[in-house]
Image (tube, grey):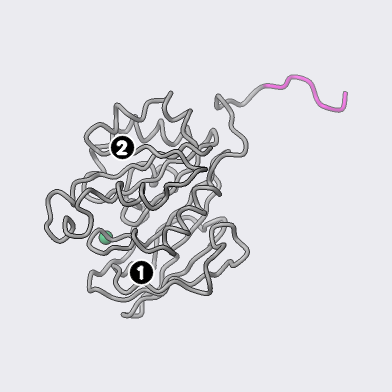
Amino acid sequence: MINLIIFNEFIDEKERETVKAVYPDGIHTVLKQGLQCEEINIKTVTVDNVNEELSEEVLSNTDVLMWWSHVAHDRVSDDTAKRIQNAILKGMGFISLHSSVHSKPFRLLMGTSCDLTWREEDDFEFLWVCDPWHPIAQGINRYIKLEHEEAYGEPFMIPPPDELVFIAAYEGGEAFRAGCCFNRGYGKVFYFQPGHEEFPTYKNPEILKVLKNAVKWAAPQTRISELSSPNVKKPILL
Ligand code: ZN
């Protein structure tokens, strides 16, 4: 059983009619419904209590943390972001969605600004599979077409990904590294671009398939209980 926590700010859905119309109960609720299955045990957290909920103990019992954020990155404390980073270095998986490129945990993990270009004009998006052998792309054909998405564009200020699973192309011509895998310590990190709050992207069965694959891929195979650099004292060969 994989223990998954889905974090969503749950602010846009309450404050903007255009978002409320698509996700009346919040993005986290739709993701929870879409990812529910026998192998995944799901809990959700919103920004109101994120700093209390994501304690070291909770994180050490969490296999994968999924993160959607947009307007309230600062309400996640620096301590919470650091706890998340440490949990990932020790083996927890992390899935960063859409505008959470600017969240504190993702920026800590990347060590860069994670800036990009963006344009909200209801473009269609082609999400091309560039690594068909990758576990996250299983069950997906050559591409996923989304009728409407926010167009993100390069340059995307991240370090080179360890694996690139999807590249996006948009109606306006932009290209973007939209499905990127990173190894951080013992933990696996996946960034996935689709998921603008005004479009029903997280109700799309193919997108949910990718996210379910990603949860399984990111679940830890090896976990350590403490970060350390032991002094081994003796050379191995003597
Ligand atoms: Zn957006």
Image point (61%, 26%), residue name: 229
Which kind of residue does numbered mark 1 sit on? Gly
- The picture quadrant where one finds residue 23 is bottom left
Residue 227 makes an appearance in the image: yes
**Which secondary structure, mark 1?**
strand
Residue 88 makes an appearance in the image: no
Which kind of residue does numbered mark 2 sit on? Val
State the quadrant of the C terminus: top right
Left or right, 227 with respect to 7, comes to: right
Residue 73, image x and y in percent? Answer: 26, 44
- Indicate yes or no whether the magenta region holds residue 51: no
User: Is 199 located above or below residue 64 in the figure?
Assistant: below
Task: Please state which of residues 122 and 173 is positioned toward the viewer in this rendering.
Answer: 122
User: Is 184 located above or below residue 237 in the figure?
Assistant: below
> Which residues, given as a range, are shown in magenta?
231-238
Which residue corresponds to mark 2? 45
The numbered mark at residue 153 is 1
Q: Quadrant of ligand 1?
A: bottom left
Image point (29%, 26%), residue name: 52
